[in-house]
Amino acid sequence: MKEFPTIKQMLTSMAAGETQPSDWTRQSLTNIQKIDGKIGAFLRVNEEQALIHARQLDEMAVRWRKNLVSPSDSTRDLFGIPYALKDNMCTKGVGTTAASRILENYIPPYSATVAEKLTQANGVMVGKTNLDEFAMGSSTENSAFQKTHNPHHLNRVPGGSSGGSAAAVAAGMVPFALGSDTGGSIRQPAAFCGVIGVKPTYGRVSRFGLIAFASSLDQIGPIARTVEDVALVLRQISGHDPLDSTSAPASTEDFTRSLTGEVKELRIGVVRDMNAEGVNDQVKAAIDKAISVLSDAGAQVVEVTLPHSAYAVASYYLVAPAEASSNLARYDGVRYGRRVEGETLLEMYEKTRSEGFGLEVKRRIIIGTYALSSGYYDAYYKRAQQMRTLIRQDFDDAFQKCDVIAMPTAPSPAFAFGEKSADPLQMYLEDIFTIPANLAGLPGISLPCGVSDEGLPIGLQLLGKAFDESTVLRAAYGYEQLRGFVMPFPHGLEG
Amino acid sequence: MEFETVIGLEVHVELNTDTKIFCGCKTSFGNPPNTHVCPVCTGQPGSLPVLNERAVNMAVKAALALHCQINQDCKFDRKNYFYPDLPKGYQISQYDQPIGEHGYLEIDHNGERKRIGIARLHLEEDAGKSQHAADGSHTLVDYNRTGVPLMEIVSEPDIRTPEEARLYLEGIREIMQYCDVSDCRMEEGSLRCDANISLRPVGQQEFGQKTELKNINSFRFVQRGLEYEEQRQREVLAAGGTVRQETRRFDELSQTTLSMRSKEEAHDYRYFPEPDLVRLHIDDAWLAQIRATVPELPMEKRDRYIRQYQLPAYDAGVLTSDLAIGEYFEATVAAGAEPKAASNWVMGDLLGYLNGRGEVLADSRVTPGQLADLIAMIAEGTLSIKQAKDVFKIMCETGRDAKTVVQEEGMEQISDMAALVPLVDEVLAKNSKSVQDFLSGKEKALGALIGQVMKATKGQANPGVVNQILRDRLSALRVEE
């Protein structure tokens, strides 16, 4: 099976006439056909439509080569590049399920803004990837439809909730995919699968068409195999969207410009008081090594504190379920999706939602409903929101002293199926390092920084100031150039 | 025991924006079901609301007209409950930070002016409409109305009689129409009213147990329903009973109120700030811009008409009950008409003519300038009042101006002495009996003589001039005798 080169390399090859768009789409579809039986990353492969689209681009490519307007023309940046979308992003006419029974046969009448943008950039959507139902989970085990296996170790989870997207990229089925990150759902699976995932600043990427889990935390971002690739994709999907009131007025940036390889003078914050007891020793060692690689290259390491991050998980598990309990009220069997008939309206609601939602989704709806109930609102939801403000202030203070903050993405490498799914609290603690960035709305990236003894990838997380993705990407790219090891491609997936 | 009635009204007013509050769908009424819908207003997965700025402008304008303080920094909240006509499972509304609060509306009642407090005015989205099959087998839902912008206006419990309640509601309608933010048609549901009513012994401070009246769909029924409920509660209390806290509805057929549900089933709406919308900030410049669009309000205008035009309160009330009528009246005066005469013509003949045909002022073919000319012709003596009424009718039908009608129909009044004297002499010659009667002291005979002259001129003779000539001639005859 053939691996994908970087996006830049594919574009160069197409510009030179050595390859054409349908070659890459066919490669993606062939790889999916060969190995996704083992991985289970895709809920739906859009084979026919993808090929038709790619052939149209083949014709355009001839004209494009003759008339190369500008190398950074946004309609060229992803020209002919195949990609996958997490199945919680609406695609007009293409089934979108959020990995839930309740939306099993739902076909959206419209496309998410990110899908529109990638289409405008002439990318080719090859399929929709698996996730924890409604993006609630850290292992993709909560999908109502199938398990997704970690390409590096088939008995391990790929992380979640964007496990399908991360596994699809890691296994070489697509050069990039989009995920969504509410409490770490891009970064943690990227870490588990040995790929790169970016959670942009809240408001950087439009949420229009993203099936909401927790509206004030959800953010779409790219997953790919190089920092340059995620930067290219991020540029395409970000920018103000008049259809999303919470999307920031900031226009998109050419993030590739910050990829200088230069880390001198860069101030790397290391958190002193962050809960370290639960962290796996190999993870700790890999993070320490990554920081010393940066510091050896001239980066300055400074200690910072985030005193309120101890309350981040607790706050998150009030705010996110509260919003989810309301966001998921629309799945009532009345207008679309699954309906289970009943004798009365109430019975129809109850049967539809009992059969349509999985256990974890129900658990969160109940937690959230409780947290918003009259008499409990002040004690739970309101205090959790106040805690968010304090956590945000912690970051503001920390970023007075540093440019990026480095820490593990997850406390351990990928765990085994069933290892944590029996204990929700343990599963929730998976997000301990990723949640603070969501609560504070900050950008973050996870990139491979080592491999455990069992051959499992370990992720380094870098966080930055709001709307300062450039610095985060600059630090990540610098590290990627310096780190002196290449993330091994998963073996033995074929046959 | 003497009881005092306490009433508070909760009024919902649909704003007449072109498009819905959170999407671009049209708001027009009476279209085939589910033809003005989109992913946003049907709550498709992943869709997001975007606030319609015009709805904000209108709500602020209405709040200013109700003398509310404007919360320049406010937010939207989600009100969570399940119902098929509520596509998202929550209504986007405003909970603890309404766009306006602490306002008032004045009513004139029994010659006294009374101020009714407005507790709050907030902005929200309307729900769809459910249609239940008669046999209960199924329900159909129309989402055309979903997302139509709605204002909820909540009064303080300052209303003391059912009649005051009706006057308050009419006042709300008048102000909304003046501000051009809603057509307030109760029968189309663009104005809806719920009423809270309780009784307490006179002199007692705390409120009695209240009931809520819902489903009142006309201004008349607001008063009727409350009158019935007031009487019902009075009887319950007088008999030593207690009023049950419940929701009741007005039944048009029996003209009574019937119990719908008790309050124990009250919802917990789990309000929380709407995370899909950013805070609404109305800066000073924006507020000033809206303030500049608030028109003179009906009550102020009424007072001005009485002061400036010396009109009776009744006239001022009728003329200001509708923005267009007031504008027509003032344009007529501006064109030179005497105010009281203009008022009489507008209230009487003009509105009478239009009402008789089921038309409104905008349909009138007579312009204020044309009406002013007609009034001037009466003042000049060119037309008698009676003639003018005939002329006016033709004007209404044809849109021609008074002078043209008079000329074409040969209707001008004859005031010329030279033309009238021979006619008078002829009448005197032919009616010696009446002449004798008059000369012998029967004043009434003069009327008969005038009538004969009018008859001879087909009513065109100026009766004043005829009278004068007749008297001159008759006194000459008396001297001769």
Image (cartoon, grey):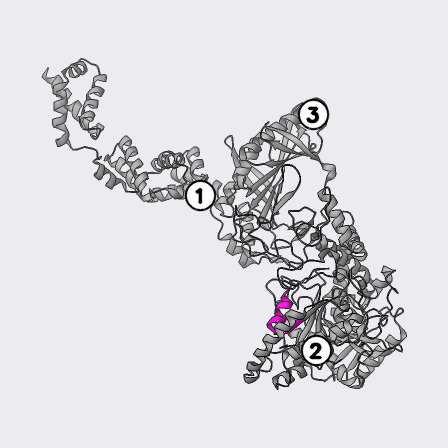
Q: Amino acid at mark 2?
A: Gln
Q: Amino acid at mark 3?
A: Leu
Q: Residue at x 33, y 42 (%)?
A: B366
Q: Nearer the viewer, residue A158 or A60?
A: A60
Kindly tell me whether residue A471 is visible in this rendering: no
Chain of the residue under the numbered disc 2 shown in the image:
A
Residue B174 higher or lower than B272, as above or below: above
* Residue receiving disc 2: A27
Q: Amino acid at mark 1?
A: Leu
Q: Secondary structure at mark 1?
A: helix
From the viewer's perspective, is B145 left or right of B136? left
For the magenta stretch, what is the residue range? A111-125
Q: Marks 3 and 1, Cα distance to the nearest angstrom? A: 44 Å
Q: Quadrant of the C terminus of chain A?
A: bottom right
Q: Secondary structure at mark 2?
A: helix
Q: Secondary structure at mark 3?
A: helix
Residue B14, image x, y percentages: 56, 46
Residue B458, image x, y percentages: 20, 28
Q: Marks 3 and 2, Cα distance to the nearest angstrom? A: 84 Å
Query: What label does residue B237 carry, if any?
Result: 3
Tell which circle, 3 or 1, labels the residue nearer the N-terminal end. 3
Location of residue B261 by image quarter: top right
Residue that extends furthest to the front in the rendered view of this protein: A495
Residue B340, image x, y percentages: 36, 35
**Residue neighbourhood size for the residue with mark 3, other residues' Cα within 10 Å, grouped as few (<14), some (14–19), many (≥20):** some
Of badges 3 and 2, nearer the viewer stands: 2
Location of residue A73 by image quarter: bottom right
Kindly tell me whether residue A119 is visible in this rendering: yes
* Residue receiving disc 1: B323
